[in-house]
Image (cartoon, rainbow, N blue to C red):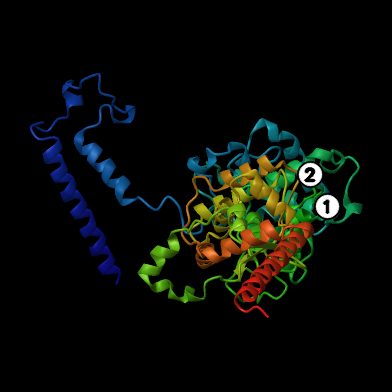
Amino acid sequence: MDEFLTNHNNSRKLVFQHSMSNLDQIQYKGMEGSSDIERGEVDESVQVHLEHRGMTVEHWKTTFNTEVLNAKSPLPATCCILKVHEVLRGQKEEAYKPNIVSIGPFHRGAEKFQLIENVKKWYLNCLLWRTETITLDSLIESIKEQEKKARGYYEPCFHLDQSDFIKMLILDGCFLIELFRKKSFVERQDENDPIFNVPCMLEYLYHDILLLENQLPWFVLEFFYDLIEGGLTGHRNSLSKLVIDFFKNSVADPNIFSNLNPNIFSNLNPESDFKILHILDLIRISLVEGLEDPSPHMEARTSDTFKLIRHLPQRIPSATALSEAGVKFEKVKGRPGCILNITFKNGVFTIPHLAIDERTGPLFRNLMAFEQCYHSCYHKITSYAFLMDNLIDTSKDVDLLCEKGIIGTLLSADDASKFFNELYHDATLNEFYYLRLCGKVQQYYKVPWNRWREKLRRDYFGTPWATISFFAALVLTVLTFLGTIYTILQYHHPS
């Protein structure tokens, strides 16, 4: 087998070198063994890279050969913490940028993060002082074994050597664990802690910790949490609950995090392949948990035709247009559960309540960016954004959904409408989860009787007085008709 691989690699090199030889004959024919650079015949107006000045053709070919043969995929399969693409970033730059804290390597070192960098060191010092079994040396040696795996989670667009990368993992990981623990247990908060005695700090942290570019691998957080809690069993479930409770107890109202389920992983099989990638992934899983597949024929995924159709999102009219066609809108009763569990049956659109505040936009944008960038992530949040963008065109649509209790917001109707209209810009869908639902809506909307029935109800039964007037007119019409019949009969058959 080894001999086969060796021969195979040698064959690849020979083929590539032969191709380079052909390229040389085409590109450098007539050069008689020396480059233009060597002969001093290079046109100075041509931009020549500094690294290539004085380089012979053979040297250039050898370098190019080495580069190609050593080329690897720029994004490993494990990569799940990435820089947001410029196309998405261009819509709202500030939605993807941290305010006060850098987590991970992408924003590390900026001056504006210095205050929290000092807090990180202070938290680590308090942790080491409180826990006799943990030393800085033991932390370094333990996490050093995880360095390669942790690097594989990041898009390789940063330059940190081993010592700086390990330092980052320790400071950021311990800071997050201590932050979540302090938020859950007030007695652990220090009166000199700027995060808890300066009101705006937590608000900034809620934003920063949920940015795609500001993540730490979940297994690293688990590692530190297990050490800090003394190796308690079931630490993954406990950590997930700790993190979700951190966001559920945020101070803003209305609150998107009221939909999160802290017990989502309580029945998880420890031997399952399911795993959390980072905090943003945990929040996404919690938001879409319990999402029922709206299309029973999803097992037909192998059908090429169905894949093409499933890829194309189907547009539907706005909420006010649907309402005029007889569609009713209702809020999901009881505990909302998954905010994506939207149904349409017998002309009734049932939608879970969604709270919108200043954090909702950045949260949704980063969740969608994660779905857009990570290869193993279905576009559930993106599908939701597309559907809501369809339903909400103007402030009238917002007013209608607010009246039905589907949307709760402190924003103006115009701002809320703008929020939904801009959310889906420049995003793509590889699988539209509401395809069948939208098909049912379109079928209902196109039936003329539904629209006529709604017009009759609105114009003649909209108020009690309108109803009374309608029936009075109906009775008068019937009496007039009967009187006419009686007169005709009297004329033809006088008694």
Residue topped by disc 2:
202
Image location (x, y in percent) of residue 335: 76, 67
Q: Helix, strand, or loop for circle 2?
A: helix
Q: Helix, strand, or loop for circle 1?
A: helix
Residue topped by disc 1:
183
- Badge 1, how many Cα within 10 Å: few under 14, some, many 20+? many
> Which residue is pictured at 77% across the width and 62% down the height?
468
Drawn side of residue 212 relative to residue 359, left or right: left
Q: Is residue 489 visible?
A: yes
> Which residue is pictured at 24% across the width and 37% down the height?
59
Q: Choose between 79 and 491: the one closer to the eye.
A: 491
- Tell me the quarter of the image containing the C terminus: bottom right
Q: Amino acid at mark 2?
A: Leu
State how far apart marks 2 and 1 are (Cα).
10 Å
Relative vertical location of residue 202 with respect to residue 406 in this rendering, above or below: above
Contact between marks 2 and 1 (CB within 8 A): the answer is: yes
Relative vertical location of residue 237 with respect to residue 404 in this rendering, above or below: below
Image location (x, y in percent) of residue 392: 60, 50
Q: Choose between 136 and 120: the one closer to the eye.
A: 120
Q: Amino acid at mark 1?
A: Lys
> Which residue is pictured at 52% across the width and 63% down the height?
448
- The residue lying furthest to the front in this view is 495
Q: Choose between 334 and 184: the one closer to the eye.
A: 334
Q: Choose between 194 and 168: the one closer to the eye.
A: 194
Image location (x, y in percent) of residue 50: 33, 27
Drawn side of residue 242 relative to residue 364, left or right: right
Relative vertical location of residue 431 with respect to residue 413 in this rendering, above or below: below
Drawn side of residue 433 relative to residue 23, left or right: right
Drawn side of residue 6 relative to residue 208, left or right: left
Residue 93 occupies which quadrant of the picture? top right
